[in-house]
Image (cartoon, rainbow, N blue to C red):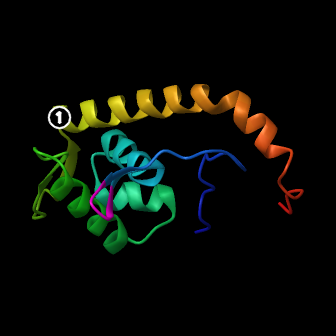
Amino acid sequence: MPKKPRHTAASGPRLRVLLGASIAIGPGKAELLEAIGRSGSISAAAREMGMSYRRAWLLVEAVNAAFAEPVVATATGGSGGGGAQLTAFGAEVVARYRRMENLAERAVAEEFAEFRKLLAPSVD
């Protein structure tokens, strides 16, 4: 199955929140968390984003380790299957990240418009 294109801008600033040298949350992790929230499954979210289950699982572990409370709660598989849920805390993390992302984008919009003129033409 072909990978679905991510809904990202061709060029522009991207907000990443760092915890030491690691990215606590950025655009890709936020997108993964939103996909888990929609699907109730790490594997379904991974398929939707065109990434391996292992990669998605490692990203979820990294996000959970970066925050004071679990962002994603998981249930072990069995006859009824497992699953994953975005916790209420996780929903708040994503909502606050998206608000910060929007504020940052608006704050630099004018300067970025001028900066963009300095970039080479896109080859997409």
Q: Residue at x 47, y 48 (%)?
A: 27
Q: Which residue is mark 1?
A: 89
Q: Along the line of sight, which residue is nearer the eye, 56 or 29? A: 29
Q: Along the line of sight, which residue is nearer the eye, 115 or 47? A: 115
Residue 109 against residue 20 in the figure, above or below: above
Q: Amino acid at mark 1?
A: Phe
Q: Please tell me in which quadrant of the rendered image residue 88 appears.
A: top left
**Are there few (<14), some (14-19), or many (20+) residues within 10 Å of tag 1?**
some
Magenta-colored segment: predominant secondary structure: strand
SS class, disc 1: helix
The stretch of residues the image draws in magenta is 19-23
Residue 92 against residue 87 in the figure, above or below: above
Q: Is residue 20 magenta?
A: yes
Q: Position of residue 107 (x, y in %)?
A: 58, 27
Q: Residue at x 27, y 60 (%)?
A: 20
Q: Residue at x 71, y 49 (%)?
A: 11
